[in-house]
């Protein structure tokens, strides 16, 4: 049986300062996204990011980019769905990703359209509920309700990563619990 982490990709969507400044819960988004990125790397999960029109709107926030290795792929895009970014299909294919963990902004726009496209391409989707955000909080519930109806999953990042560990016997369990304590302290 193959390790499920080998077929899992964490996709960080548009965590650019220009967008984060408009988010009422930007500190939460950055903190939980940072936790998820570090947890994914600890467990050997592939990580990539997208940036909406980076030449005009700037790069991913430095608060996020300092957490990942320099070889982390970052895909510029103009479409709202991250899966329309040039080269992302090669990242998915070369890493044999059949399930995406999504975090980023905005939930009712780029996160939603990415999830819909992934599901349409028969790629599983889990939205990390503590790592997504939107300008208008009232937009969150109907978007998540629709994605759940389309068979996406919506779970907090700790739940997802504890599920990947499976038990306290996992070789990375102690390192992971230290990471949890650091981000919850």
Image (cartoon, rainbow, N blue to C red):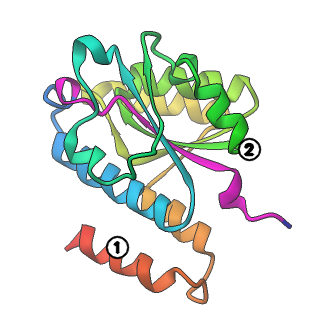
Vertical side of 48 occupied by 114: above or below: above
- Magenta residues? 2-19
Label 2: element kind: loop
Q: Is residue 73 left or right of residue 57?
A: right
The residue singled out by tag 1 in the image is 179
Vertical side of 130 occupied by 173: above or below: below
Q: Position of residue 177 (x, y in %)?
A: 40, 80
Closer to the observer: label 2 or label 1? 2
- Counting residues from the N terminus, which is met first, the one under dot 2 or under dot 1? 2
Q: CA distance from mark 2 to mark 1?
A: 27 Å
Q: Are marks 2 and 1 in contact (CB under 8 Å)?
A: no
* Location of the N terminus (image quadrant): bottom right
Q: Position of residue 106 (x, y in %)?
A: 34, 26
Residue at 56%, 62% (x, y): give it: 44
Q: Is residue 35 left or right of residue 183?
A: right
Residue at 71%, 39% (x, y): give it: 94
The residue singled out by tag 2 in the image is 96
């Amino acid at each position: 049986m193959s390790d499920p982490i080998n077929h899992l990709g964490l996709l960080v969507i548009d965590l650019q300062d220009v967008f984060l400044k408009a988010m009422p819960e930007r500190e939460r988004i950055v903190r939980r996204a940072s936790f998820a990125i570090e947890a994914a790397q600890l467990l050997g999960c592939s990580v990539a990011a997208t940036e909406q029109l980076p030449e005009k709107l700037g790069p991913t926030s430095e608060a996020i980019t300092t957490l990942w290795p320099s070889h982390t792929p970052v895909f510029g895009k103009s479409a709202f769905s991250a899966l329309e970014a040039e080269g992302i299909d090669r990242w998915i294919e070369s890493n044999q990703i059949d399930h995406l963990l999504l975090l980023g902004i905005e939930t009712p726009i780029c996160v939603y359209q990415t999830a819909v496209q992934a599901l349409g391409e028969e790629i599983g989707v889990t939205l990390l509920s503590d790592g997504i955000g939107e300008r208008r909080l009232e937009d969150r519930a109907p978007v998540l309700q629709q994605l759940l109806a389309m068979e996406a999953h919506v779970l907090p990042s700790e739940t997802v990563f504890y599920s990947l560990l499976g038990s306290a016997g996992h070789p990375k369990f102690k390192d992971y619990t230290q990471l949890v304590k650091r981000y919850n302290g």
